[in-house]
Amino acid sequence: MAHETTETSEKDITTNWISSSRFLFYLHVFCILAFVLGGCYKLYNHRYLGKPDVEVQKSSQYTPEYK
């Protein structure tokens, strides 16, 4: 009977601190990696695509042209 409780307590995350700390470490690494990759993907989707063609008034150019 004692062997049975020891076997189940080794698999329990609340009693076996070595396996639970390993699990929590890998969980933190996975979460950080997911946030970093998600942020990189979001920045890639909202990247600057280049200079837009904006029509500037003739009077506000470097060499203005007036009517």
Image (tube, rainbow, N blue to C red):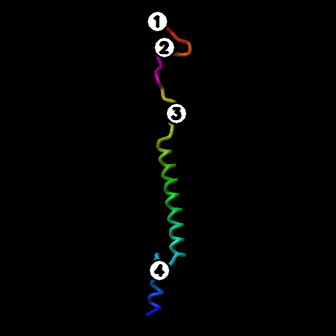
Considering only vertical position in the picture, is 45 above or below 11?
Answer: above
Residue 46 position (above or below residue 34): above
Q: Amino acid at mark 3?
A: Gly
Residue 60 lies, in percent from the top left, at 50, 15
Q: Dot 1 corresponds to which residue?
A: 67
Q: Residues within 10 Å of mark 3 (few under 14, many from 20)?
A: few
Could you say where residue 28 lies in the image, as x and y percent from the top left? 51, 63
Is 57 magenta? The answer is: yes
The residue positioned 51% from the left and 62% from the top of the image is: 30
Rounded to the nearest angstrom, the CA distance separating label 1 from label 2 is 9 Å
Question: Of callouts 2 and 3, which one flags the residue occurring earlier in the amino acid sequence?
Answer: 3
At 46% from the left and 76% from the top, the residue drawn is 14
Residue 1: x and y in percent read: 43, 93
Q: Which one is in front, 65 or 22?
A: 22
- Based on the picture, tell me whether residue 55 belongs to the magenta stretch: yes
Identify the residue position indicated by label 2 in the image: 58
Q: Residue 11 bears which disc, if any?
A: 4
| Residue identified by numbered label 3 | 50
The amino acid type, in three-letter code, at marker 2 is Lys
